[in-house]
Image: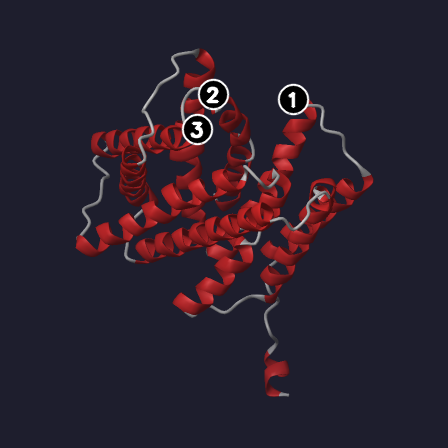
Amino acid sequence: MNLFLYVMTVLIWGTTWIALKLQLGVVAIPVSIVYRFGLAALVLFVVLLLSRKLQVMNRRGHLICLAQGLCLFCVNFMCFLTASQWVTTGLIAVVFSTATLWNALNARIFFKQKIARNVIAGGALGMFGLGLLFWPELSGHTATPHILLGLGLALIGTLCFSAGNMLSSLQQKAGLKPLTTNAWGMLYGASMLAMYCVFNGIPFEMEWNTRYIGSLLYLVIPGSVIGFTAYLTLVGRMGPERAAYCTVLFPLVALNVSAFVEGYQWTAPALAGLVLVMLGNVLVFRKPKPVALNAKLA
């Protein structure tokens, strides 16, 4: 079951960039995010109410959902989308891939979980592999103020993503399932971003055509309802650090799709990076060998 959820998350989030690209046009980006998570929350609430699986939360649960909505469904998206104005997607992908290491560190700090060496080694190997995959983009950057600002925003977005992972893990330890917490979190996140749009005078326009509506529905159902539920379920089952290795594999899927859709050309460094990413994946999910009793007594 974990493998199915993992593969599904990687495939879904590795292809959402196509829908995000199709969203660009008349509707402002923050408004599109509001539509996405507002509709996703509505779908989740309808499903949960009809199936009678909506869990009751106390005040503490709602406060954590509020924080989760701020981190996962509001601030991190605004940070990454703003950063993309000055920083290429390759560099953003490399920064985002550090979520594996941040999750391992945060799990140690907040939940006293031991940091597995294979997770750190695999995450570092995967990040190095991504560096090779996106080397042409990375080598073209110079340290201008806008680039540094974009990198800072990408890092803040990654830290918010990691914080959202910790909050979801905390909720699951309390017996609350991702379907319920995601429904409330998406509602809170969309509401806060809607208030931001109103405050800044951003109009709530709609583009009534197949391109925009189709891409929006893809982001709502597979991208949000299924993707976030599958991923955060993995956070509860596998731990935040292992689940976060998905962030290293997303760009890999995106590049393969780009090879068919946009004519992306694989190079020798990119293929070497692909090998390193896959080796990192093997390291992250390798089970530690049990320590022999004789070794302990020696």
Q: Residue furthest top?
A: 209
> Which residue carries the number 3 mark?
219
Identify the mark nearer the N-term, 1 or 2.
2
Indicate which disc residue 57 carries: none
- Asked whether residue 197 appears in the rendered view, the answer is yes
- Is the residue marked by circle 2 packed among few (<14), some (14-19), or many (20+) residues within 10 Å? few
Q: Residue at x 79, y 43 (%)?
A: 269
Q: Which is nearer the eye, 295 or 104? A: 104
Give the percent coordinates (x, y) of residue 154: 52, 48
Q: Which is nearer the eye, 270 or 135? A: 135
Tell me the CA gap for discs 1 and 2: 20 Å
Check the image and report above or below for 238 versus 139. below
- Is the residue marked by circle 1 packed among few (<14), some (14-19), or many (20+) residues within 10 Å? few
Query: Is 23 displayed left or right of 194 in the figure?
Result: right
Tell me the CA gap for discs 1 and 3: 19 Å
Q: Residue at x 38, y 49 (%)?
A: 71
* Amino acid at pointer 3: Leu
Q: Quadrant of residue 257?
A: top right
Q: Residue at x 28, y 57 (%)?
A: 174
> Which residue carries the number 1 mark?
261
Q: Residue furthest front?
A: 145
- Asked whether residue 236 appears in the rendered view, the answer is no
Identify the mark nearer the N-term, 3 or 2.
2
Q: Secondary structure at mark 2?
A: loop
Tell me the CA gap for discs 3 and 2: 16 Å
* Amino acid at pointer 2: Gly
Q: Residue at x 47, y 24 (%)?
A: 23
> Which residue carries the number 2 mark?
25
Give the percent coordinates (x, y) of residue 198: 27, 33
Q: Secondary structure at mark 3?
A: helix
Mark nearer the viewer, 3 or 2: 2
* Amino acid at pointer 1: Val
